Image (spheres, rainbow, N blue to C red):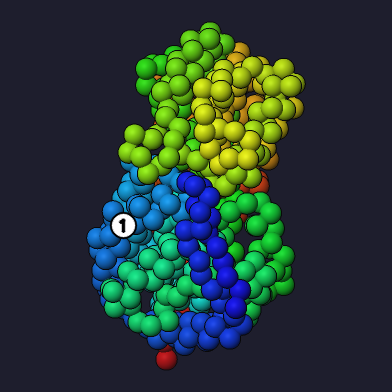
Amino acid sequence: MAIQKTISPIDGSVYVERELADPARVEATLDKAVAAQRKWRETSLTERARLCSRMVDAFVARRDELAQELTWQMGRPIAVAAGEIGGFEDRARTMIALAEEALAPIRLADKPGFTRYITREPLGVSFIVAPWNFPFMTAVNAVVPAIMAGNAVILKHSAQTPLCAERFQQAFDEAGLPEGVFQHLHLSHDAAESVIRDPRIAHVSFTGSVAGGAMVERNATGRFIATGLELGGKDPAYIRADVDLDEAVPGVMDGAFFNSGQSCCGIERIYVHKTIFDDFVERAVAWVRQLKLGNPTDPDTTLGPLVRPAAADFVRGQVEEAVSAGAKAWIDPGEYPLSRPGSAYLAPQVLTGVDHSMRVMYEESFGPVVGIMPVADDDEAVRLMNDSDFGLTAAVFTRDVAAGEAIARRLEAGTVFTNRCDYLDPELAWTGVKQSGRGCSLSRVGYETLTRPKSFHLKHA
């Protein structure tokens, strides 16, 4: 039996070991999901909501335990780890509340002699592949609405955060969800690809890398099934000349460095109007210097390790290349003893003198580094913000609400913000353009991707 090992970024120890599902286990899980979904689809929406709400209750009751496990699995500082449980609850309860309206039949105007309406039918079995960086919140985006829509779910979580899948299972079991409606599997990459190809799977939700999204598309080719792909970003922020820097600096810098920069919608590029550029950079560097890099189990730590040493070395390489090409690094890594090559711990970094020829400005970093460029006006900012293969979110900081909204309309991104960033409102559609993916989760619109329309055209006898 193959064993999956989870190496904690805190100290390099093996934190979790799990047996990977063998072909027999996968077959049994798929068969059980199909059988359970046939019954679940007939369950009333009221009952689905009751059971999903009980699941959320059971889940959040373990807030402290879940936060500790999260810290050890992926390295988020314990001081903020429990916040993800709050985000999980908000998203889950919002999607439960939106289900009645989103899934209601569409009644058409009267036509003499006919009854006509459109229903939203569940797809069947949904295979959800979730990432490690926000392991509860990303998974719940797909899991709860899929089940509320009448689908069965099989969750494959990242090998870095296997306990997250088990905690979902535990909470659903305690809630009394019928057996087979929600299941999880610990799978190898090859086994996960096999599941995507299986004819019993009707929907795939994947959150992860562009390469991972391409893998899903390859394996789903020719099956004509629904796929939702959320593939990350290189998200920009624009700081206009009219901002209040006391608010803009902490807002955008937290958006760049929270979770050690390991956020698909984190800010990775900042464009600042040239008249306030020097002032902004000075304040931004001062903000970063107050971060405390350390063991994330220490309540005083505000910047934890990256998920693994290779991820930290990848970002180190981007920074070194940029500096070699003429960029200025404002933070001395020597001030951070834990930050050294081959370690998951990485000193934060702010770069100026950057341009779009440098990897750090066009390639997803997923780490505690941000490049800052001056711009002459709104048009230059928009051009540079859109000069990317990604388009998940984009943010404009300004006191002029109308100007901010006008700029936002020109940006190529799935979500646009003014005066905030790195945030997900579950009542809004979560989607991306270009290599940030395809499809939509959350909001009323998200239910459309988890169901198919069925039209009823009934002629009266």
User: Which residue is located at x 44 percent, y 17 percent?
Assistant: 286
The spot of residue 347 in percent (x, y) is: 54, 30
The spot of residue 379 in percent (x, y) is: 61, 21
The answer, for residue 150, to whether it is visible in the render is: yes
The spot of residue 201 in percent (x, y) is: 57, 76
User: Which residue is located at x 60 percent, y 50 percent?
Assistant: 231
Q: Residues within 10 Å of mark 1 (few under 14, many from 20)?
A: few
User: Which residue is located at x 32 percent, y 48 percent?
Assistant: 82
The answer, for residue 141, to whether it is visible in the render is: no
Task: Tell which of 419 and 9 is nearer to you.
Answer: 9
Element on which disc 1 rests? helix
Residue, far bottom: 461
Side of 265 relative to 36 (left or right): right
Mark 1: amino acid: Glu
Side of 379 relative to 152 (left or right): right
Image quarter (top left, top right, bottom left or bottom right) of the C terminus: bottom left
**Residue identified by numbered label 1:** 65
Image quarter (top left, top right, bottom left or bottom right) of the N terminus: bottom right
Residue 118: quarter of image? bottom left
Side of 86 relative to 407 (left or right): left
Side of 429 relative to 274 (left or right): left
228 over 67 or under it: above or below = below
The spot of residue 103 in percent (x, y) is: 39, 67
447 over 400 or under it: above or below = below
User: Which residue is located at x 46 percent, y 39 percent?
Assistant: 304
